[in-house]
Amino acid sequence: MQTGSQTALSLSLALGALLLVAAPSRAQQGPPAAADNDIRIGNIMPYTGPLAAFATIGRAEAAYFDMINQQGGIDGRKIKFISVDDSSNPKTAMEQTRDLVEKQNVQLMFGSFGTPDNLATRTYLNEKKVPQLFVASGDEAWAEPKPYPWTMGWQPTFRAEGRIYANYIQAAYPDRKIAVLWQNDQFGRDLFKGLQEGLGATAGMIVADLAFDASETRIENQLGILKATGADILVFDGAPAIAARAIRSAANLDWHPVFILDNASASIASALRPAGLQNSLGVISTSFLKDAGDASWKEDPHIKAWFAFMNKYFPDGDKDDLYAVFGYAAADTLLQVLRQCGDDLSRENIMRQAASLKNYQTPVALPGIVINTSPQDFRPIKQMRLVQFDGNAWQPIGDVVDSAFTTVRDDN
């Protein structure tokens, strides 16, 4: 029979042994390279709220990874794509990202939507050394590998897009007056700034500009003011729902300027069709992906494969929705990165491979548009093509434009 002191000693020794056993498991609570043989990927999307139209990107990405999993995954590893809603609220995006990293143990964040939302999480993810890959935003902030080596964009920048429109206007309409209607946030400011930079000494062509908030539901007053300036060209930079109202309202005002529409809203399903296809005739934008509704791609094997994908894995998706193509292409790019990783799915190697893409062309990219990255170059896609809507599909204007030259020094 043990005395009280002996019992206490035994309990102490037993507790010590349990702590020694438990210690390694606590030390290993950081995310393994492939937990439970899954590749866990986090994603933030506006499934609700004013920018919910863009949620098609996340749904297409989820469908793409479902297809890859059904085909056997990546070297036998299945992708677990955990996509959550933030309603385009940066605070919610931060909360959701913490949960994905610290509780869901994702290996990386991929394709999260929006400039304010990703800016809100960028410092946290870089401090945690979690890849923030292929951000669904054209802000230049995603191409700063020195201060933020774990953050990388994907699409061409908004600022570069603005400069492309400026070059087009100078060549095609050198003597016309320009009005600009832009969304009052970083997205709108960047494209407007690129337009002004591209016009350079001829920036006086801009006779008026008005800003609007993303939450606005009416745009008629602003359009009336801009029409009264006598402008022949209207550059619109905003979300799809407001773009649809702007196109429709201009037609109702019997104002028919050369209408230039930002790439982010160049969706037939989300902007042009709601505006009225007859009202959208002649609208000009940019593209870097094939338009599945364009008859010239009817026999393209990659577009045929995309239609098969939509029919099987995303049957409720709209085949005219540009964001479905965007999500498919972005997910395909990530797949290439993961394949390059081989057996090493550490966060460091994922980031290393993302910065080692060489002339990769996603199947639904326009001919001539390839993806190149390096440790010093975090801008995967640098090319775009001007397009014009013919009432049914987007038709190309001229050749692919390399937007690399549009990166400029900020003298402020």
Image (cartoon, rainbow, N blue to C red):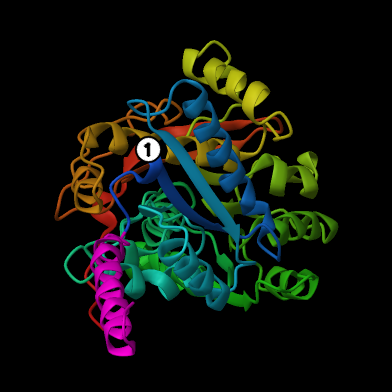
Q: How many marks?
A: 1
Q: Is residue 14 magenta?
A: yes
Q: Answer above or below: position of 314 versus 259.
A: above
Q: Answer above or below: position of 183 versus 150.
A: below
Residue at point 61%, 77% (across, down): 211
Q: Is residue 214 magenta?
A: no
Residue position marked by numbered label 1 in the rendering: 37
Residue 398 pos. (x, y %): 42, 33
Dominant SS type (magenta): helix
Residue 267 pos. (x, y %): 63, 44
Q: Is residue 250 left or right of residue 170?
A: right
Front-most of 208 and 237?
237
Q: Answer above or below: position of 91 versus 237.
A: below
Q: Quadrant of the C terminus?
A: bottom left
Residue count near mark 1 (Cα–Cα under 10 Å), binned few <14, some 14–19, many ≥20: few
Q: Answer above or below: position of 264 versus 219.
A: above
Q: Which residues are magenta?
A: 1-30
Q: Is residue 322 left or right of residue 194?
A: right
Q: Quadrant of residue 332?
A: top left
Residue at point 71%, 35% (across, down): 318
Residue at point 43%, 41% (across, down): 330
- In the image, what residue type sits under mark 1? Asn
Q: Is residue 289 left or right of residue 212?
A: left
Residue 337 pos. (x, y %): 29, 38
Front-most of 150 and 267?
150
Q: Quadrant of residue 7?
A: bottom left
